[in-house]
Image (spheres, grey):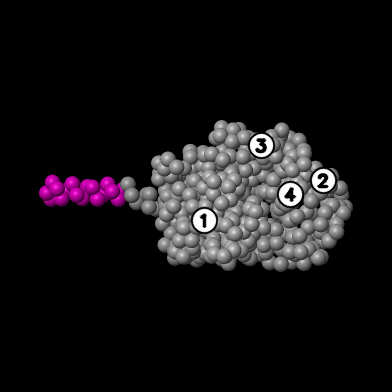
Amino acid sequence: MSYFAWLRRACVVLLFVLVAPLTARSQTPPPSPCSPSNWTQADNNGGFPYTFCPWTYLPWRVWLPDNPAQIDQTNTAILQQLYLPNSAHGGVNDPDTYTLSTVGVLPTQTDQGFSGTPLYVATPSDPLVHVDCTNAQYGCSDGNGNTITSIHDVYIPAWARPPCVLCTFPSDNGIAILQPTGEEFGMYQCVWNRDVVNGDSVGNGGTLCDFEGAYIGTYTTDQGRNTGNTSGGNLASALLTTYEEVVVYGQINHALSSHVGCVTGVVYPAPVPSGACDGFTGIPSGSLLWLDMTRAQIDADPDIPANMRVFAYAMHEHGMYVMDTGGYADNSSSSLSQPVIEQVLAPLYAGTLPQSPWTQWFNDNGGGIAGDAILKLQTNIMPWNLLGTHMKVLDQCYAFGNCTDSIPDPGYQGGNNPTLPSNR
């Protein structure tokens, strides 16, 4: 064998050694460090633990291939030509699209608060409340997108409150409570401002409040979907990004969520279209957006701030769903909001924390608390308008898990101290 032939062969062997593991890892993600079974580790002390990721693998926790084969070209063009240019500072829905927000301190004055859905954890010692689905405008549902006619009595902490109880402006008041049975109970437009007491009732003119829609779902077996009766179709905990994911561990193990200005039509997993576009065609409710940049490319891109890389990684590995419209004056414009993050109200109302655990992260990255008790960040956020052709809309088969290159559930590796997945 000549020297050059030997050198070529050695280079091929070396290339295989270097590339094969990367290729294998890109198609076979590491086992998830979190599980729906870890709902028992959740409490009211400051956000949900990293070890807990609710609902089944599909559709919210799906891993995406590094180069998905099935791109929705029509809606990708709409995303790139309409939504992304409008999602800039000074865009059509600024500041809604240009602000990352979460509650910062306990709302105590009129028009303090936020329309994001807070999550509480109930125990058997909390008040037991009767639920009446009769005459609810949008009805009741289970955790798999089915309509149901009744929901059993639920526990609600006495001190719990909806997110915008002091607001005079129009607001979505959603609330979700983890039950001692491993279920999540949620309501839409149920507002009260007193302590819950044993024997209270909700819905149909209840003693605590009425509601427009409600659901009940089991973390370990259900998909985390509703009929669109409390949101665009996902249960409250399905797409919320938590403090522990972003700040403590730097790894998000599920898809993100973005509210948009308007939509046209519906694809799975959205059950109904929300906020129809006026005079033009938008992307559908349920669209799964994907960022075609690897972690190395994300790290090297000067337009993506360092503090937002964890969100960008998740957009490449899990995507970002468009499930609902919101935060806009009307539905005549198209744009993307910043990723939806959790509203950590529980420890504020319980009195265990004086401020949100997100406070220091917002301060460190150029944001801070506003007069409406909300932490806001308008710099160092996702630059949707600068990502251009890197943003794609995927075929809904990835949400179903039946694309030709869909990745099966990699499983749960267990343990109370999660090992982070290797960078892809």
**Secondary structure beneath label 4:** loop
Q: Residues within 10 Å of mark 4 (few under 14, many from 20)?
A: few
> Residue 267 location in percent, x, y?
56, 66
Q: Circle 3 is placed at which residue position?
A: 370
**Secondary structure beneath label 1:** helix
Which disc is residue 147 wearing?
A: none
Q: Circle 2 is placed at which residue position?
A: 193
Q: Circle 1 is placed at which residue position?
A: 83
**Secondary structure beneath label 2:** loop
Q: Residues within 10 Å of mark 3 (few under 14, many from 20)?
A: few
Distance from Cα at disc 1 to Cα at disc 4: 27 Å
Asked if the stretch drawn in magenta spans residue 336, the answer is: no
Residue ID at (81%, 57%): 210
Distance from Cα at disc 4 to Cα at disc 3: 17 Å
**Mark nearer the N terminus (4 vs 2):** 4
Magenta segment: 1-17
Residue ID at (31%, 48%): 17
Query: How many numbered markers are drawn?
Result: 4
Amino acid type of the residue that numbered disc 4 sits on in the rendered structure:
Phe
Distance from Cα at disc 3 to Cα at disc 2: 23 Å
**Mark nearer the N terminus (4 vs 3):** 4
**Mark nearer the N terminus (3 vs 1):** 1
Q: Residues within 10 Å of mark 2 (few under 14, many from 20)?
A: few
Q: Circle 4 is placed at which residue position?
A: 169
Q: Are circles 2 and 1 on residues that touch, CB within 8 Å?
A: no
**Mark nearer the N terminus (2 vs 1):** 1
Pair 3/2: label in front = 3
Amino acid type of the residue that numbered disc 2 sits on in the rendered structure:
Asn
Distance from Cα at disc 3 to Cα at disc 1: 28 Å
Amino acid type of the residue that numbered disc 3 sits on in the rendered structure:
Ala
Q: Nearer the viewer, residue 45 or 336?
A: 336
